[in-house]
Amino acid sequence: MDLTPARLDRAAGALLGMAAGDALGAGYEFGPPVPDSERVFMKGGGGFDWAPGEWTDDTSMAVPIARALAEGADLRDEAVLDGIVASWVDWAATAPDVGIQLGAIIRSTAPNAAAVRVVARELHDRTGRSGGNGSLMRTAPVALGYLDDAEGLAVSARAVSDLTHYEADAGDACVIWSLAIRHAVVTGELDVRVGIPALPVERRALWLARIEEAEAKRPADFERNGWVVEALQGAWSAIARAGSLAEGIELAVRGGRDADTVAAIAGGLIGASRGASAVPADWREIVHGWPGLRSADLVELATRSARAGSSAG
């Protein structure tokens, strides 16, 4: 694939948009919907006293994935997944926020892919559910490693989701969103339905109905956005109503509740269509987070991942 400057800008936009949404939403997490009359800005604070512009666990968990892809790794390789899980375990040891479901898995077993999958399955069997939004929030970089390989992307997106989320909804959502991000990077177009054919046949109609519902409602209507389905719906609802990258991310934050995660999800996709150049300069200036990275570092990681992903078989 020819990686034109526009495509590279859009690839960088996937990571930078994700991080910007995460950082913008950090100060609003767990809060009610934000009215249109109230300004939304990178104020920091929130339940974990984030610094202004600091991203949360959403972007932190995506960083090891991006780093692996930037080195040309294949996420279908179990050894690569082992390395990502080990990085998550190191991060979780000092992270202020890991999330209930993710923390219960990452902090309770050996630091390798097989072990966390076992715990994820046990958690699902014990509670009857494992459809949190924690795998969808980190999926943005996965697409960059498979720009020439949509089929490989669908397999890899589900594999990374399955590490911590056994429920099919989580894997489906990551497949849909990752393929939409790939499509946006390659074409500049926003089409969340492009990934539906990659789902099991019996689940396609369900997801099409969920997407239609998202387009008919506003982000604030999805009150259970800690659930992966409503997180995706809230993110797509925001994007579908937006005239710009900043507006899409802000609309996602205004939905409230798990605002940082929904905005990170939305930012990954709308960033992939509009590009890093569309991220407001004042956001780019202060966005930062674990492990000591800033906007320029995310752009570099995205560019390297896209170059590796454009040569995939």
Image (spheres, helix red, strand yellow):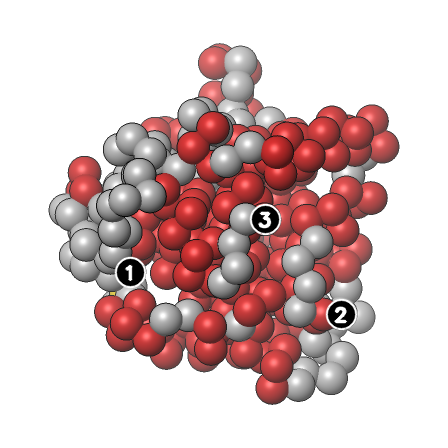
Q: Residue at x 24, y 57 (%)?
A: 42
Amino acid bearing label 3: Ala
Sequence-wise, which precedes: disc 1 or disc 2? 2
- Mark 1, secondary structure of its residue: loop
Residue 261: horizontal and vertical position, in percent?
A: 40, 44
Q: Residue at x 47, y 21 (%)?
A: 123
Depicted 153 relative to depicted 46: above or below: below
Amino acid bearing label 2: Asp
Q: Residue at x 38, y 52 (%)?
A: 250
Residues packed near mark 1 inside 10 Å, few (<14), some (14 to 19) or many (20 plus):
some
Residue 159: horizontal and vertical position, in percent?
A: 63, 45
Residue to which mark 2 is pinned:
148
Depicted 224 relative to depicted 71: above or below: above
Depicted 218 relative to depicted 23: above or below: above
* Disc marking residue 290: 1
Residue 99: horizontal and vertical position, in percent?
A: 34, 35
Q: Quadrant of residue 166?
A: top right
Q: Quadrant of residue 4?
A: bottom right
Residue extending furthest right? 201
Drawn side of residue 249 relative to residue 273, left or right: left
- Which mark is in front, 1 or 3? 3
Residue to which mark 3 is pinned:
240
- Which mark is in front, 2 or 3? 3
Q: Residue at x 70, y 54 (%)?
A: 191
Sequence-wise, which precedes: disc 2 or disc 3? 2
